[in-house]
Image (cartoon, rainbow, N blue to C red):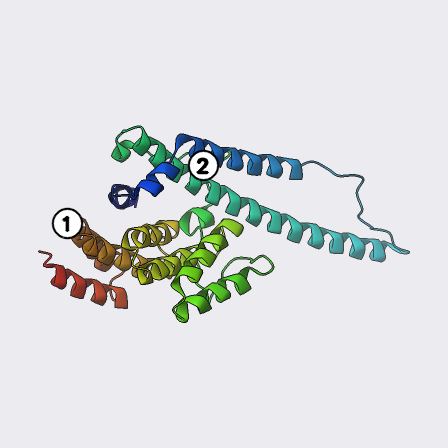
Amino acid sequence: MKPLRTALLATVMLLPLPLAAQDQQTLADIRQELTVLHVEVQRLKRELSTTGSPSADVSGNTVLDRVAAIESELQRLTQKTEEMGHRIDRIVADGTNRIGDLEFRLVELEGGDVGALGETTTLGGGELPAAVAAAPQAVDSGAAGGELAIGEQADFDAAEKLLAEGQYQEAAEKLAAFNQAYPGSPLAAAAEFSRGKALDGLGDTREAARAYLAAFTGNSSGPVAPKALFELGAALGRLGQTDQACVTLSEVGVRFPGTGAEEEARAEMAKLGCS
């Protein structure tokens, strides 16, 4: 996974950038993003501090009443702990991915070798939980596997509606705002993929390729991964990056055999004249 991710990200990062986009990619911007991540970590640390005396009520007239009250309180605390653990895992996974992207951008700005980057250190130390590492945001709009914030699904559906109606500029802006408002969302990969489709509709193939890359690397085994990888390869072909496009499209059949995306990739490879 790492060699492919490195090759794909390096390819898209090296595509020609407009002058305005280059101006935005400054060290000050990266330092600001790192500051935001630091603030999020500090917020998590504050949540580990107590806020007052315990509020659990385990009283009762009989021993059985007290036992029942204790069991009920244990269930409540267990559920709360699981919810907090899930939220922290999502923040750690999202923060680790962001730091990895920042490392690529820093190396690129300083003229280093992006291919020499190793695995990004997990935010906060240690290792990601197995479930998070295997599928950090593994869902699509129809089957959200994680907990959603209030209004999260509605915001995503509103953006999808704009895309379906051909309002590409509004859809692209709303989907970009979605991933800013809900970092680590279970719908993140699907939102990036749809943003890529909206940017394609606007004729911005380079930025569309970046969005497809983000959708694939965000969850390389999720439901949108096959089409995201195909669309990335097709976009590289339209940008004239034929060799990289052929390599990317060939990976679709290797990683996702028997899918509709594989058939589309074969047809695209034939059109590009891939050997």
Q: Nearer the viewer, residue 25 or 257?
A: 25
Residue 71 falls in which quadrant of the image?
bottom right
Q: Residue at x 29, y 53 (%)?
A: 209
Label 2 sits on residue? 122
* Secondary element at tag 2: loop
> Farthest front residue?
19
The crowding category of the residue bearing disc 2, from other C-alpha atoms within 10 Å (few below 14, some 14 to 19, many at least 20), is some
Q: Nearer the viewer, residue 167 or 9?
A: 167
At label 2, which amino acid type do we have?
Thr
**Relative image position of residue 258 (x, y in whole percent):** 25, 66
Q: Is residue 199 left or right of residue 54?
A: left
Instruction: Note whether residue 126 is visible.
Output: no
Label 1 sits on residue? 243
Q: Is residue 232 left or right of residue 50?
A: left
> Quarter holding the C terminus?
bottom left
Q: Is residue 32 left or right of residue 6?
A: right
Q: Nearer the viewer, residue 203 or 46?
A: 203
Q: Is residue 242 left or right of residue 24?
A: left
